[in-house]
Image (cartoon, grey):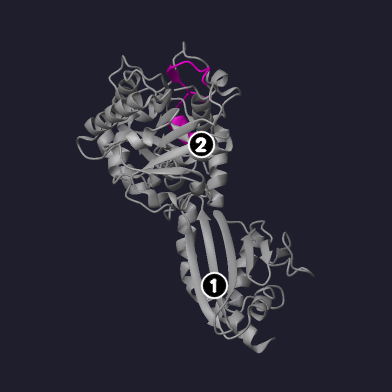
């Protein structure tokens, strides 16, 4: 089979693991570069929500089955699947899957295999996770098909298992009792850099087959990562109390309790933290492979947090099509960060225009319909700590970017949506959204959503402390808007 460069047609790439964290980002990146992408999916329906799903060819199947049809006419086959934590024999399953994939690629005449593995020195006593990653790489390379194996360590990106574990531990716990593995060095790499490295490995035939170790510019212990994450996230300094008796197995149960990472997966990840995962001094520089400097740890965290707070993580580790990832929804509740909500809805016998007019009349002299005294008290407390309070009132014209009491208008789409962002001093980010939709009877449905993205433990405590007041204020607010729409005041 001709190489991707020699072929007159765009390269055809088979991506396995396209419903997973990295594969779900690689597939659209390859499409943007002009590649023809086929994806192997055990559950094709899981691809439907992806905005790029209609641009790829879907080959239903699994790594245990006949891969001949999926491999037909493929130039490059990408291996991005693993069975980590899937029962006591998961490493055996990984090897069997890799052997089946390698045989199918060789029989189909595939020009190249690209595989994402894990860092770690082969001379070390590797954890089961890292040992299996290396074993899979050897199986693929032994197929006779030229194989590019990228070995990465901790991947930093919104929704990655490593990042979510780090983020939740630091966000929730101002003081942590930590085991010895927090002193192990690692070399984290941004998920965008991982994606771009894979794109090059797939599309650049000048990249010789072999093993490439990749990592960011910062070599850090896990404890240093925790402290630097807290600083980037604007959290108070975290105190770490190290104890010698907290084993990786015990640690995994604690991680499973505090974070969204399920215990079977946490156990394997935590056990891997006993191994130093740092790029070898003799390895080709990641900057050379990328063609640009990789992102540093702080910038990687800042980017991940921006995506987290905007709720826009395109993929998460829970998207992978394996039972260990207990949250099987494409967009699980925790994806992109903890989100606390209060949602109220009512039907109003008035047109959307009249309901929206009542929504946009809020604030200033109109007030907030229910618990005005509580709103004013909250504004006074905010002003006392240096926030805007309620003193800004209503602008002469409500528009995007205008202040409204202690809110700011984020979106204004008449007659269907008004989105406000709180500018008061808060341990998190608060938003209030009103959505109006017409009903078949000529009336309207009004949905009011208060959303809070807590920052750290204090943010969570704040939400639950004010929740009793929400039960009084928010129902009265939506009822007041409905009343104003009916009376036309």
For the point 68% across and 70% down, the residue is: 414
Judge by depth and name the residue closer to the eye, 66 or 157. 66
Q: Is residue 263 magenta-colored?
A: no
Judge by depth and name the residue closer to the eye, 122 or 183. 122
Q: Where is residue 486 in the image (x, y as percent from the top left)?
A: 63, 87
Q: In which quadrant will I find the N terminus?
A: top left
Total numbered labels placed on residues in the image? 2
Residue 274 is left or right of residue 111, and the answer is left
| Residue 380 picture quarter | bottom right
Q: Position of residue 247 (x, y in %)?
A: 26, 33
Which of discs 1 and 2 lies nearer the camera? The answer is 2
Judge by depth and name the residue closer to the eye, 238 or 87. 87
Give the spatial CA distance, label 1 vs label 2.
42 Å
- Secondary structure at numbered mark 2: strand
Residue farthest left in this picture: 88
- The residue tagged 2 is 36
- Work out whether 185 lies above or below 26: above
The reply to whether residue 136 is visible in this rendering is yes
- The residue tagged 1 is 447
- Work out whether 153 lies above or below 163: above
Instruction: Give the residues drawn in magenta, as a range.
Output: 205-229
Mark 1 vs 2, N-terminal side: 2
Q: Position of residue 110 (x, y in %)?
A: 40, 25
- Work out whether 215 lies above or below 160: above
């Amino acid at each position: 089979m001709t190489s991707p460069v020699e072929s007159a047609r765009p390269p055809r790439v088979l991506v396995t693991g396209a419903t997973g964290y990295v594969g779900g980002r690689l597939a659209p990146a390859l499409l943007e570069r002009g590649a023809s992408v086929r994806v192997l999916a055990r559950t094709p329906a899981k691809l439907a929500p992806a905005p790029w799903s209609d641009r790829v060819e879907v080959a239903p199947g699994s790594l245990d089955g006949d891969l001949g049809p999926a491999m037909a006419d493929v130039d490059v086959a990408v291996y991005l699947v693993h069975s980590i934590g899937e029962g006591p024999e998961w490493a055996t399953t990984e090897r069997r899957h890799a052997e089946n994939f390698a045989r199918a690629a060789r029989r189909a005449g595939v020009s190249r295999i690209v595989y994402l593995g894990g860092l770690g020195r082969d001379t070390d006593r590797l954890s089961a996770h890292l040992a299996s990653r290396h074993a899979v790489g050897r199986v693929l390379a032994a197929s006779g098909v030229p194989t590019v194996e990228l070995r990465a360590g901790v991947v930093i990106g919104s929704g990655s298992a490593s990042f979510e574990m780090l983020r939740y531990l630091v966000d929730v716990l101002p003081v942590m009792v930590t085991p010895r593995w927090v002193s192990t060095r690692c070399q984290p790499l941004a998920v965008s850099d991982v994606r771009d490295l894979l794109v090059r490995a797939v599309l650049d035939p000048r990249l010789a087959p072999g093993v490439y170790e990749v990592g960011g510019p910062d070599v850090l212990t896990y404890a240093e990562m925790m402290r630097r994450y807290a600083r980037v996230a604007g959290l108070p300094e975290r105190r770490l109390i190290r104890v010698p008796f907290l084993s990786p197995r015990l640690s995994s149960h604690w991680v499973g309790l505090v974070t969204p990472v399920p215990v079977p997966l946490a156990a394997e990840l935590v056990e891997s933290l006993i191994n130093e995962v740092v790029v070898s001094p003799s390895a080709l520089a990641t900057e050379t492979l990328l063609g640009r400097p990789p992102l540093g740890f702080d910038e990687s965290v800042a980017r991940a947090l921006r995506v987290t707070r905007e709720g826009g993580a395109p993929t998460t580790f829970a998207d992978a099509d394996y039972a260990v990832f207990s949250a099987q929804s494409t967009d699980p509740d925790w994806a992109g960060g903890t989100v606390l909500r209060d949602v109220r809805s009512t039907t109003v016998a008035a047109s959307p225009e009249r309901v929206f007019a009542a929504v946009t009349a809020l604030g200033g002299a109109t007030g907030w319909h229910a618990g005005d005294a509580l709103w004013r008290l909250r504004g006074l407390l905010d002003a006392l700590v240096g926030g805007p309070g309620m003193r800004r009132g209503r602008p002469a014209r409500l528009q995007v970017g205008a202040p409204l009491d202690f809110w700011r208008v984020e979106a204004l789409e008449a007659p269907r949506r008004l989105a406000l962002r709180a500018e008061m001093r808060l341990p998190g980010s608060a938003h209030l959204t009103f959505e109006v939709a017409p009903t078949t009877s000529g009336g309207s449905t009004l949905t009011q959503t208060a959303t809070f993205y807590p920052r750290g433990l204090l943010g969570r405590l704040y939400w639950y402390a004010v929740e009793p007041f929400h039960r009084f204020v928010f129902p009265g607010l939506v009822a007041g808007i409905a009343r104003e729409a009916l009376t036309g005041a």
